[in-house]
Amino acid sequence: MSQNSPILGLPYIQAAQAQKHVTHNEALRVLDALVQLAVSDDDRTAPPASPTEGDRHIVAAGATGAWAGQDGAIAIYETGTWRFEAPRAGTRAWVLGAQDLSVFDGAAWTRPLGNFDNVARFGLGATASAQTPFVVRADAALWDAAPTAQGGSGGVIQSMNREDPTKDAGLALQTDYTTRALVGFFGSEALRIATSPDGVGFSDALRIDPVTGIAAQPQRPKFKALTNYDNYLPVGQWTQVGINSIEFDPLGTFDPVLNRFTAPHEGTYVLGANALHATDSSTNTRLFIRLIKNGGSAILGASTGLNGGSQHDQLSGAQATVLTTLAAGDTVTFEARAQNNPAYLAANQTVLWGYMLP
C-alpha cells in the first residue's frame, strides 16, 4: 500500500502503525492549509516581519531569507515556523490582497480572471464560437478613457487592424443578424459607408479617397447631356430641345431618346440649361429657354438671352439654373423659343445638366 495519497500527497495510516494520531494529524494539517486555499498575496519574495499563525502566501520568484529556494510554493506559518507545500497543476488560490484568483498551471501561477492573454474565446451574456470568438450581449457598452489623474491619457482610441489592403477592417451593422450597413475599409484603401436592403447587394453612400481625402457619393444622381446637332427653332413656338447625347450619367437617369431627366429619388436638385446660337445673323432674335417638369406647364426655370440683338455663332444665347424639389419619378425637359426671327441652337454647346444636393 502506498504511503501517500496521489493528489495532495496526504500520509496514509499504515497497518499496525504505532502513534497513528501523528500521521492522521499531519494529513489534517495539509488539508487545513490547502482546502479552500486563500493566501494573503502572491508577489512577496521574503516573509513578513511579524507573521501570524496560519498566515499563507504564494512565494514569488527570487525568494530570499526563510523562503529561499521555495519559489512558487505555498508558505504556511505554523507553530512559529514556515513550512511549504508544493502546488500541483490546477491548484487554485484566492489572493486576498488583489481580490483575484490565481491558478498554478504546472509551471507558474497565473491569474485567469485578471489576465486574458491568449484566451481562445470570450462570451459575455452569450456563447462565443470559433467563428465569433468574442461575443457581448448587452443593452449598452462603454469605452471609457483612463483619467490623467489615474495615469491614463484622458483619451480613448479603438483600433481595427487588417493584414493587407485586400482584407476588410470595419463595422457591420445588422438587423436580425443580416448586415444592412458597412463602415470602414472593405477590399480597398478607400473609406466606405455602404448600405444594403437585403444583406446581399451593397451601395456606397460615401467613398473617401485615401490619397486626396476627397469624398465621393457614387449614388447621388448627377448628369450632363447635350445635343449633337443644330436644333431649329421656329418663331414664337416653344420647342423641346433634342438633348440626345450623354456626357456623363453614372446612374442612368437621363433618357437620350425622350430627351429628359428622371429623378430617381425624392430630394432637392440643382438643374441647369445652356443654349448658344449656331449662326451669325444681323436679324433681331430674342431667345427664351425654360425647364419643364413632367412634360406639363410647370416651369422650373426660365431665362431670356440677347434681348433684341443679333445672333452670334456660339457666343450669344441664354442660360437657366434652378434649385427645386423633385419627387421620385418626376421628369425634366428643356424647351426653347425664338422671338421675332427663327434661330438655330448650336450642336455640342447646348446642354442640360443637374445633380441632387446631399
Image (spheres, grey):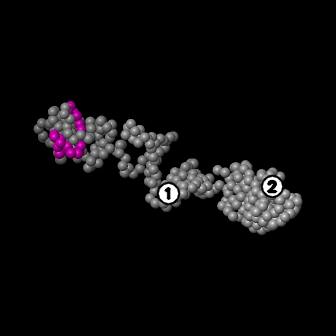
Residue, x 45% and y 40% (percent of image)? 144
Q: Is residue 69 magenta?
A: yes
Q: How many marks?
A: 2
2 or 1: mark nearer the eye: 2
Residue at x 16% of width, y 40% of height = 65
State whether residue 5 appears in this view.
no
Q: Is residue 299 visible to the viewer in this orientation of the structure? A: yes
Mark 2: few/some/many CA within 10 Å (<14, 14-19, 20+): some
On screen, residue 1 versus residue 163, left or right, reads: left
Give residue 272's position: percent from left, percent from top: 73, 56
Q: Nearer the viewer, residue 257 or 346?
A: 346
Circle 2 residue: 304
Give the class, few, some or many, for how many residues have Cα within 10 Å of label 1's Cα (few <14, many ≥20).
some
Of the pair 69 and 334, the residue shown nearer to us: 334
Asked which secondary structure carries label 2, the reply is strand
Taking the spot 44% from the left edge, 59% from the top edge, the residue there is 163
Residues at marks 2 and 1, CA–CA distance in whole angstroms: 54 Å
The type of residue carrying mark 1 is Asp
Residue in view at x 18 percent, y 47 percent: 2
Q: Horizontal placement of 235 versus 317: left or right?
A: right
338 vs 32, nearest the viewer? 338
Which comes before the other along the chain, label 2 or label 1? 1
Locate residue 202 relative to residue 128 in the image: left or right.
right
Name the amino acid type tagged 2: Thr
Q: Which residues are magenta?
A: 51-72
Q: Secondary structure at mark 1?
A: strand
Dot label at residue 168? 1
Residue 165 x %, y %? 48, 60
Tell me, for residue 45, which label it has, or none: none
Reply yes or no: does residue 239 show up in magenta.
no
